[in-house]
Image (spheres, rainbow, N blue to C red):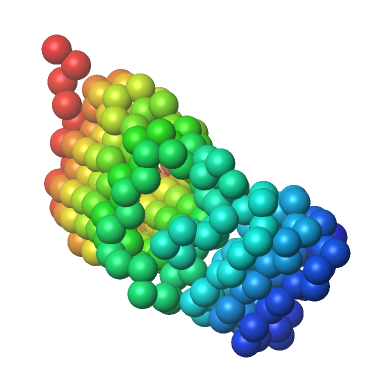
Amino acid sequence: GAQAFMGSGLNGTLALPEGVASVGAQAFAQSNVKNLVLPTTLRSIGNAAFAPMTKLASINADGNNSFVVNNGLLTSADGKRLLVTAHQGDIGEALANDVIETIDNYGLAYAPFKTVSLPALKSIGNYGFANSKLEEYTLEGDVTVGYNLFTASALKNLVFGDGRNEIPNAICLNCTALESVTLPTTATNIMQNAFAGCTALKELELPANVNYMEPGAVPATIEKLRVLNGN
């Protein structure tokens, strides 16, 4: 069931037995599993069932018709849903995929990718890129996102595409390498702790339409805050 073994002392290899058909949300989250082996009978996996797993190095789904593993990514068989990444394996520093549409909570958390290109992406769950090696990203305005999206990642440069009104809660919390942020001209709200702890972010331009900012919307160490003229 959901959260059945969450935060447990499980480590090493987790090989689910044949016959298991479903795994609930967060069932094995926050465990120390290094190698994950899925049975051929598995048909349903809940959100963040296997994430975060900070030591996860390999995933095996051989023979399973519902889920596949490609370059360390566990996805649905059609490739549209990304569930979790084996982030300590030798899977390179760049991810380019034109099929993935949704990323589960923690789907790319702790991942080694410095660059990510996902043109078909529609939604990213909570902590989607948290603690990852991602260095630069353009977040398009039509992509739905959760909270703490880039928290504690290696992000240096972030561009928001126009069309987004709200800068989500804690989206870049404690991204200490973040130096450059381009906010969308459509932004109106910057939510709590959006850029709190971003100590390298010294300058920020606020679009003219921003009229609501919560605590932590900008880092306490900001040196220059410029409000752009709508005209």
- Identified at 37% across, 45% down, the residue is 97
Left or right: residue 49 compared with residue 20? left
The correct choice, above or below, for 223 with respect to 211 in the image is: below
Asked whether 9 or 184 is in front, the reply is 9
Q: Is residue 218 left or right of residue 126?
A: left
Residue located 80% across and 73% down the image: 17
Q: Residue at x 62, y 64 (%)?
A: 61
**Residue 174, located in which quarter of the rendered image?**
bottom left
Among the 4 quarters of the image, the one containing residue 2: bottom right
At x 67% / y 51%, what residue is drawn? Answer: 65
Provide residue 122's location: percent of width, then percent of height. Answer: 47, 33
Q: Is residue 97 visible?
A: yes
Residue 116: horizontal and vertical position, in percent?
31, 51
Q: Is residue 139 above or below residue 150?
A: above
State the residue in front, 42 or 190. Answer: 42
Q: Report x, y in % for residue 220.
A: 30, 56
- The percent coordinates of residue 77 (x first, y second) are 59, 47
Whether residue 24 is visible to the viewer of this picture, yes or no, is: no
Q: Give the quarter of the figure containing the N terminus.
A: bottom right
